Image: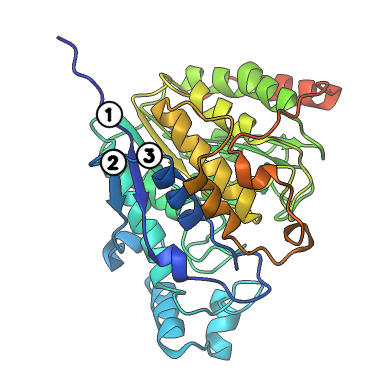
Amino acid sequence: MAMSRPRPAYIGSEIYRRSTYGPGHPLAIPRVSTCTDLISALGWLAEGQYHDAPLATDGEITRFHDPAYLAALKRAEAAQAVSAADRARFRIGADSNPVYAEIYRRPATSAGGVLLAARLVLGGGVAHCPGGGTHHGRPDRASGFCYLNDPALGLLAWLDAGLDRVVYLDLDAHHGDGVQDAFAGDPRVLTISIHEAGRWPRTGDADDRAGGSARNFPVPRGLNDTEHRFLMLEAVLPLIDARRPQAIMVQAGADSLEEDPLARLSLSNNAYFAAVAALAGHAPRLVVLGGGGYNPYAVGRCWAGIWAALNGHPIPDRLPASAETVLRGLVYNRAAGRNPPEHWFTTLRDAPREGPVRPEIERLAARALKETLPA
């Protein structure tokens, strides 16, 4: 008799509920806690599915990160300040990477959550860790709101366990530069990124192959659901199937949604749900992370819907009162939060945002498949 796969695992932590990067910062919003509260309100967490993210150990973190940098993060948290030398060397307290109350513990919890997700699926299965996805982090410095690179740590854990055909798919509006650079030239890892062309960090050109280990899709402004689906079906999934991966990690940063204030793409959350569902069966191990996303209504609804897709839960046309209460309790101090549209409170699924497939999208798909992937 065939063994049934375990139920998907959800990894969260209460640290995200009380932690903020500070007033005025794009990450001064509740994201993981909103997702967790929504799926709880919808009755989508069965017994045994929820796992609390542990704090990653120093040894786990320094598998990728410089011990001196880790020590600097701990100093910054203890003092709630950073020296001029640490700021200059490690970019802590610089470049929109502020010193805040949990500047070490929050990223170390995200790293611990992703490492737990990687371990939980080693025997096969699915895990969702929306607190992960800090894909800009560098071995020895903070970058792009990211202090540790938890996707890189999770991928390294898979490699250390003996896997040698791994795919990392990045759906964030910003190129996953830190992860790509971490595995440049490593034939065991293929990184694939769909991101807005010209957006910070302004890397990930279509011809950037990272020594054969990357495929990049820098898309134009206004990317719609039809175009995203075209890229997935015509390029991304063929690339993945050619690799015959033993494991797939997806960074599902929600800033590619039309409502996001830091990018100019036009996806609905249906594109995320479809992308995650399309990956089912393409590898025996799947981990889905969070990432960017700076509108709490859009992010929470998107990541909760991803959890529904991973579990096969039908999404109701209208949210029950308990879930609506979660969304009505959010505070969003940007202009869009002053008069939110009613569907941000009452629905989980966006209206589809279909449209024509532009020639530049077709060219990106064709270009990515030109070179033979490494075996």
Residue 292 appearing in the image: yes
Disc nearest the viewer among 1 and 2: 2
Q: Which residue is mark 1?
A: 124
Tell me the mark number nearer the camera, choosing from 1 and 3. Answer: 3
Q: Which residue is mark 2?
A: 49
Q: Are marks 1 and 2 in contact (CB under 8 Å)?
A: no
Which of 325/242 is in front? 325
Residue 342: assigned label = none
What's under tag 2, amino acid-wise? Gln
Sequence-first disc among 2 and 3: 3
256 up-or-down from 206: above or below: below
Mark 1 vs 3: CB contact within 8 A: no
Quadrant where the C terminus is found in the figure: top left
**Residue at image point 48% right, 45% down:** 183
Alpha-carbon span between mark 1 and mark 3:
25 Å
In this view of the protein, which residue sits in the foreground, 348 or 22?
Answer: 348
Give how far across and how far down residue 368 sits, in percent: 67, 25
Relative horizontal placement of residue 266, taking residue 36 as reference (left or right): right
Q: Residue at x 57, y 25 (%)?
A: 274
Q: Secondary structure at mark 1?
A: loop
Residue on which disc 3 sits: 43
Circle 3 packing at 10 Å, graded few (<14), some (14-19), many (20+), is few
Q: Give the image location of residue 256, x and y in percent.
A: 68, 43
**Mark 2 element type:** loop
- In whole angstroms, how far apart are the C-alphas of marks 1 and 2? 15 Å
From the viewer's perspective, tell me whether residue 160 is left or right of residue 230: left
Q: Give neighbour class at mark 2: few <14, some 14-19, many 20+ (Cα, 10 Å).
A: some
Q: Quadrant of the N terminus?
A: top left
